[in-house]
Image: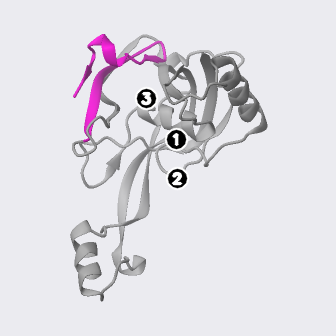
Amino acid sequence: MPIRLEVWGDYALFTRPEMKVERVSYDVMTPSAARGLMEAVYWHPGMRWSVDRIHVCSPIRFTNLRRNEVKATVSARSARTVMGRGTGDLYLCTPENIQQRASMLLRDVHYVIEAHFDMTDRAAPGDNPGKFQDIIKRRVRKGQFYHQPYFGCREFPVNFKLCEQIPDCPESLKGERDLGWMLWDMDYTDPENIQPMFFRAVLRDGVLDVPTLESGEVHR
């Protein structure tokens, strides 16, 4: 069942995994970020979202921003040690672990996400595609969500509405642009060995077509 969702915001950060220290955004929203955004609006175990294409409705603009980030994490080994001894700290002291890092963000972003959902074997007997589609459209019109949708980081909230008509492609995005390898999604088939999956992203007249897993264009 197809759904078109128009989303926009002031900033976005879809972090490239190859950048280890300071965050650098992909040129456009990734399929996994689009799927997460759709799930923030409506998720149900009886359905699974799939992103078909992403329309880029505003010119791609970058800006730099310095943000406070926590530089450390609580490791599982430390947690086990503290639990075994019965003493120690199971928290991070934020003032002691803050570090300023630069991020290359997207600004003034505007997309239309074309997606559909498939029924899963966890659907209840009374569940059906028409029911889910009605619920989704009603929630979008009312601005409802399970948690605030965001563009890559929680600091960058998303505005959204149902798309009645796809905006025209910006002049700067007409033609074909190779965006390189982009994260498609994560493979959670083996919880002990979660693997990223990538595809060759090409923007054609402002439209990013997202291949299916069965297409052979998605690689681990």
Residue drawn at point x = 34 percent, y = 50 percent: 23
| Magenta residue check for 188 | no
Residue 142 higher or lower than 218, as above or below? below
Q: Nearer the viewer, residue 129 or 209?
A: 129
Q: CA distance from mark 3 to mark 1?
A: 19 Å
Q: CA distance from mark 2 to mark 3?
A: 17 Å
Mark 3 / mark 1, whichever is N-terminal: 3
Residue bearing mark 2: 154
Amino acid type, mark 1: Arg
User: In the rendered structure, which segment of residues is drawn in magenta?
Assistant: 194-220
Q: CA distance from mark 1 to mark 2?
A: 15 Å
Categorize mark 3 by other alpha carbons within 10 Å: few (<14), some (14-19), many (20+). Answer: many
Mark 2 / mark 3, whichever is N-terminal: 3
The label shown at residue 2 is none
Amino acid type, mark 3: Pro
In the rendered view, does 70 fall on the left or right side of 192?
Answer: right
Q: Please identify the residue farthest to the front as the structure is shown.
A: 125
